Amino acid sequence: MIKLFNNNGSVIDENGILYKVRDILQYGDEVFFDIPSRSLVLLFCQNTVDSLFFYINCIERKVVPILIDAQSDYSLTENIIERYNPDFIIAPTTFSNNFSNYFCINNFKSYNIFKNNENIVKLLDPILSLLLSTSGTTGSPKLVRLSYSNLVSNASSICGYLNITDKDRAISSLPMNYSFGLSIINSHLFVGGSILMTMESITQRKFWNIFDEFKVTSLSGVPYTFEILKKFRLLNFELPSLKKLTQAGGKLSNDLIEYFADYSRNKGIDFIVMYGQTEGTARLSYLPSEFINTKLGSIGRPIPGGRFHLVDEKGVKIEASETPGELIYTGPNVMLGYADKLDDLFDGDVNQGVLSTGDIAYFDFDGFYFIVGRIKRFIKIFGNRINLDELEQLLKKSGVDSACVGKDNLLLVYLLLEENKIIAKDILSKKLGIHPSAIELRIIQEFPKNESGKTLYSQLQF
């Protein structure tokens, strides 16, 4: 089995102090002395070297971590603790919470280690490496079970198509407990590159100061990241070290794609749009920079080692181009399966390398794939099937930000501005022919988002 982390890989803090992976593992010998292999650990993550120290040691020592955000409300994480009964909890020393049934056995810099009072031997699946939340929502008990080969195969593939080498340096612009953010760490350390860990946001001056000072070569973000980058013109700084700009975590609008494609072209930077899911260990496809304009809006082609195909509503494979169907991915990075409770961690590979993405897509004559919606993001209005994602995109083209939900014969549209009601009503009723009686418009201060910037539709009330 190939190691996920190259011993020559480096982790750098905001002060420029560099730690080699080999040193991190050596320091871990004493810290992990009382944490046996195959233990289940709940790790509260921050974008710090200390947090990454525990993640790297867990993976290398075959300790299985559940990664959640250290900013999580404790009432949410209680659910995970109750369902999975982890052997250990590793949390920042700033935590004021007392974990019932746990006692502190050790500490390392800014983290405390708590041990479960119960000495329960857990016979975890031997290939289980890591547990991540399905959508970045920190308190969800539904977790994705990933294997060691999942992590290695996806890191290797990413390094291949992005041409990441030991000379590349990324920055932690996304949470490390989020699959996209974690894949940035994994891929760079896989080839012996480096990762600069910072708690600073892209909106903070210090972020860009250390970005420039430590010569970061790669910047990654979700759609919300790129909206902020454009709005505040944050890339107007002189960043001579920047060589790669990558996006995933949701569909980026065509306008923003063209904007950043032009910026990248003028600066001699590679801009790569990607598509992925936590269930695929992070990334499933990519659109090379040379096709950004000619295949605008495409998720590209599968990553090396992966394959796409489409199926219709009856599960029959679609052979014709320009024909929408559910996108199915096959590859070595597909998760083992989901977990809702401790017993699920003993299961083997349920998916067997095949992932039903839940996305509706089509491929063109050149074999490039385009996402057009989600299977579950459809409702019927008086017998007509309505794609809620397409409605949002249509409103967006008219300058109206929205979040569309609903049920059969009721379309509920959340808007940020009162004055947008007239525009939205006109588009939905006149242009699309949806009867006004089936439309309800509501004003909301902000759309609920997860940490990757995706709208949390489940939090919008009917």
Image (spheres, rainbow, N blue to C red):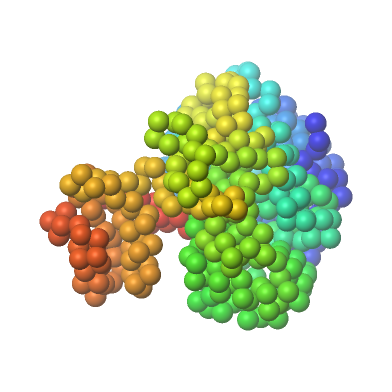
- Image spot of residue 181 (x, y percent): 62, 53
Q: Is residue 203 above or below residue 379?
A: below
Residue 404 as seen in the image, left or right of residue 28 = left
Q: Quadrant of the N terminus?
A: top right
65, 2: nearer the viewer: 2
Residue 432 as seen in the image, left or right of residue 204 = left
Residue in the image at 25% along x and 60% along y: 432
227, 435: nearer the viewer: 435
Residue in the image at 48% along x and 27% along y: 341
Residue 10 as seen in the image, left or right of residue 391 = right
Q: Is residue 51 above or below residue 220?
A: above
- Image spot of residue 91 (x, y percent): 60, 44
**Residue 148, picture quadrant:** top right
Q: How many marks?
A: 0
17, 453: nearer the viewer: 453
- Image spot of residue 123 (x, y percent): 63, 18
On the question of residue 452 being in view, the answer is no
409, 237: nearer the viewer: 409
Q: Is residue 178 above or below residue 429?
A: above
On the question of residue 56 being in view, the answer is yes
Residue in the image at 35% along x and 47% along y: 377
Residue in the image at 65% along x and 70% along y: 207
- Image spot of residue 33 (x, y percent): 77, 32
